[in-house]
Image: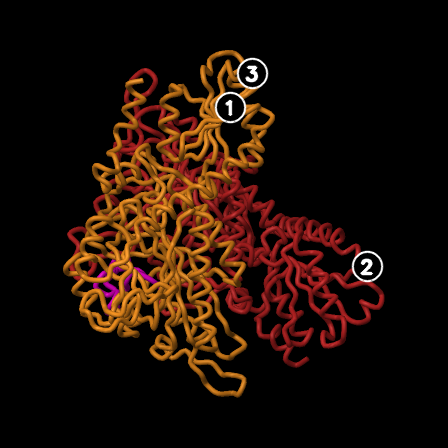
Chain colours: A orange, B red
Amino acid sequence: MAKDKKLVESITSMQEDFAQWYTDVVKKAELIDYSSVKGCMIIKPAGYALWENIQRELDRRFKETGVQNVYMPLFIPESLLNKEKDHVEGFAPEVAWVTHGGQSELQERLCVRPTSETLFCDFYKNDVQSYRDLPKVYNQWCSVVRWEKETRPFLRSREFLWQEGHTAHATAEEAQERTEQMLHVYERFCEEVLAVPVICGQKTEKEKFAGAEATYTIEALMHDGKALQSGTSHNFGDGFAKAFDIQYTDTNNQLQYVHQTSWGLSTRIIGAIIMVHGDDSGLVLPPAIAPVQVMVIPIQQQKEGVLDQANKLYETLKTQFRVKVDDSDKSPGWKFSEQEMRGIPVRIEIGPKDIEKGQCVLVRRDTREKYQTPLEEVPAKLARLLDTIQADLYERAKAHRDSHISDAFDYKEFQTALDKKPGFIRAMWCGDQACEDKIKEDTTATSRCMPFEQEQISDVCVCCGKPAKKLVLWGRAY
Amino acid sequence: MAKDKKLVESITSMQEDFAQWYTDVVKKAELIDYSSVKGCMIIKPAGYALWENIQRELDRRFKETGVQNVYMPLFIPESLLNKEKDHVEGFAPEVAWVTHGGQSELQERLCVRPTSETLFCDFYKNDVQSYRDLPKVYNQWCSVVRWEKETRPFLRSREFLWQEGHTAHATAEEAQERTEQMLHVYERFCEEVLAVPVICGQKTEKEKFAGAEATYTIEALMHDGKALQSGTSHNFGDGFAKAFDIQYTDTNNQLQYVHQTSWGLSTRIIGAIIMVHGDDSGLVLPPAIAPVQVMVIPIQQQKEGVLDQANKLYETLKTQFRVKVDDSDKSPGWKFSEQEMRGIPVRIEIGPKDIEKGQCVLVRRDTREKYQTPLEEVPAKLARLLDTIQADLYERAKAHRDSHISDAFDYKEFQTALDKKPGFIRAMWCGDQACEDKIKEDTTATSRCMPFEQEQISDVCVCCGKPAKKLVLWGRAY
């Protein structure tokens, strides 16, 4: 049992050091490994299987809204990146530059895509001629590179995986509709599949995407009270279209600029799953996204019939659930710890005594509740239990999130709340960037969004006391 | 009708200029577009949907053999690439180099991965400690970059999409088994899903992968008689393990080097689908891989009830088939041409006269045969028809391939066959690279493989007349 304990003890507790707990979990749950390439991570099978499930489910939801997948080049010529002024200012400082191909120096530097607006624009410029060619609702799954100085697994790395949708529309209204539609696809995906509650809103001018007219975001709250921007959707208006000259002939035979959007969600969201649901024993995965939903663990497996019965259970369950049997030569206690570390939602214990009674024991990862269950009732019980876990994880996360939202009416309250009860702060804002800058400078908190659900909780800006324009959600963020 | 004709006439015929026909088809079937990034292509929705189907089916087959997916960094530090001598010699001349990150010059250049052996080795060096950690059977789906001078869509481009499997094993036998197993996964996938017959064999020393002990290949024959290497599988023995110091403790507590393999298949295979099945009207897609298997085309759709009936048919078919209705305002003739260009296996024509008779017309893309079919029999008839088309495409491709294999017993026959009947040539070889070099120099043909099915068709080398060692399949290749 000394060995079993060690596995669990080797994670720092959340209370003690949340950042170290996070690092321990991503390593011990074997989600990632560090590589010889500074700032880039290796996504191991357990981590990549999560991303595959995210991709599959999100891609299905995209396609239901008419999205088509494409693939654009990895490289962007410098002159192309330079075409939209705000965009290049936002991204040029953090891109990687290819200067040599084969043995010779390139005539023009290429950057490794940090995002692909410029490539899609360059493509749409030729591909869109008439109103008949619209809308274009394209998406790509790929990796992008941003030369970050400080990196953390999933949350910030020099290369990360994501999807980026890029659309072109005939009208401003249609572009706005698509921008909001995709934000709500993200919202529902996070809440229904990842059991992560999010708040939808619009970014301030200061925080919006480089080149966008408006940026919308879903913001989640991590266990330590810090916010994580979990997905964004941008309306570009016709700004990029003008910079790249993307025009179409409308039904009256007039040339018009297209209106564009883009929207993205990345492997960062895996950080949210970890930091919203995890505990001191490791990862806790929502059943809807867990690569393995059920682990069958035989007890005293060397005794006659135990392994047979475990395998029989596996056969019964495998068509309906993502199930595995751990028949390795480790001790049951070690297996329990391992399965808890990996966040597998349910384990099934089955030993000689259980078999005698024609039953087994189902154990929830999240609450550790145990259910003695007759063997023939396992499939039905398990289906209900996984649904319950999924719902409970969401409710627990929502309760935590809601209990960590404070309203602040003056600057002192704002600062106190941030330190005493880390979480989101709802406070009014005058609309002036100087106040955002001051708040960031004083507290490191940033405006996360102007929530869609606006409320006038006070008449004055929490920072400067001038008349308030918007309710803003503030917080320290990853 | 002038307009309808134009669409088809705008493709060059295969006979006239095969290379131009190929370029026309990839463009007109909207598989790709050229980009502002020299040598890189844009994969458009129709092309990417093919790749998605390839991925889905191949990934399923991989996982059945125990493969797990991972993701490795995009970049390889120069010192890491340099670790295995043959490997770096093979790849360094054609890689893209990142020299700057953000505003500053990197201390060490990074190459954009041309393939990831070195990254996997660097990872396995730390991740493999004991025999309990073996085997590692990992794969990744990603893009790679090779700085090619001359590029052609799908066949050769500076960036392409692929999967690369990388495995580590305790014994040489197990590595060899895995190398051959994955080659046969490719073989069955090409034959069963893409309807592309392939010949399996081993590459000569000259043609093997940089750093491999042995390379195996599947070779397909295109319609113009040129070969296309369609997938490869390499056994590295313990060469990389020694270069990277990947050792494990065996059951006797002795340190041993691992034995490794890698295997890859790329978007190049889409070129094979085009050049094996296509015709002068455009693409011909095997039903198993076609993104759209059936296109319903209403005739006189403005007449009452026609569109309703077309949509009703769609509703009946959509759960069982990948089906669409073309209810655009184009003429039926134009739609027929378009559907033929895109290679959709079956179209269903339904007009007022058909509806009167309670029938519709099924038309095969490959043979253009028409089948008047009572509406209630459509699902069953369609299922059989798609199976028939799939089987026929394979048989037709195989008959073409087999009728373009010549046996050559002396050098004159070899040269005559190459020019008179372009295709594969079976001829004996002494095993000396000088003969391969001479043949390539004289004829531009290369040794495609030493087929697994060996036969001693002559005692002497087709080139030098010395005693023959191996039967080799030769051909001009893409």
Name the quadrant containing residue A100.
bottom left
Q: Are marks 3 and 2 in contact (CB under 8 Å)?
A: no
Indicate the chain on which mark 3 is placed.
A
Q: Secondary structure at mark 3?
A: helix
Q: Is residue B71 left or right of residue B21?
A: left
Which-is-in-front pick, marks 2 and 1? 1
Q: Is residue A60 above or below residue B84?
A: below
Amino acid of disc 1: Gln
**For the magenta stretch, what is the residue range?**
A89-116
Indicate the chain on which mark 2 is placed.
B
| Residue A406 x, y percent position in the rendering | 28, 54
Q: Secondary structure at mark 2?
A: strand
- Residue bearing the label numbered 2: B374
Q: Which residue reaches farthest top?
A: A303
Please tell me whether residue A470 belongs to the stretch shown in magenta: no
**Co-location on one chain, circles 3 and 1:** yes
| Residue B160 x, y percent position in the rendering | 41, 56
- Residue bearing the label numbered 1: A372
Q: Are marks 3 and 1 in contact (CB under 8 Å)?
A: no
| Residue A173 x, y percent position in the rendering | 46, 75
Please tell me whether residue A92 belongs to the stretch shown in magenta: yes
**Co-location on one chain, circles 2 and 1:** no
Q: Is residue B15 left or right of residue A22?
A: right
- Residue bearing the label numbered 3: A357
Rate crowding at label 3 as few (under 14), some (14 to 19) or many (20 or more) other CA atoms within 10 Å: few
Amino acid of disc 3: Lys
Which-is-in-front pick, marks 3 and 2? 3
Q: Secondary structure at mark 1?
A: strand
Q: Quadrant of the N terminus of chain B?
A: bottom right
Mark 3 and mark 2: Cα distance apart in space: 59 Å
For residue B64, say whether it is visible. yes
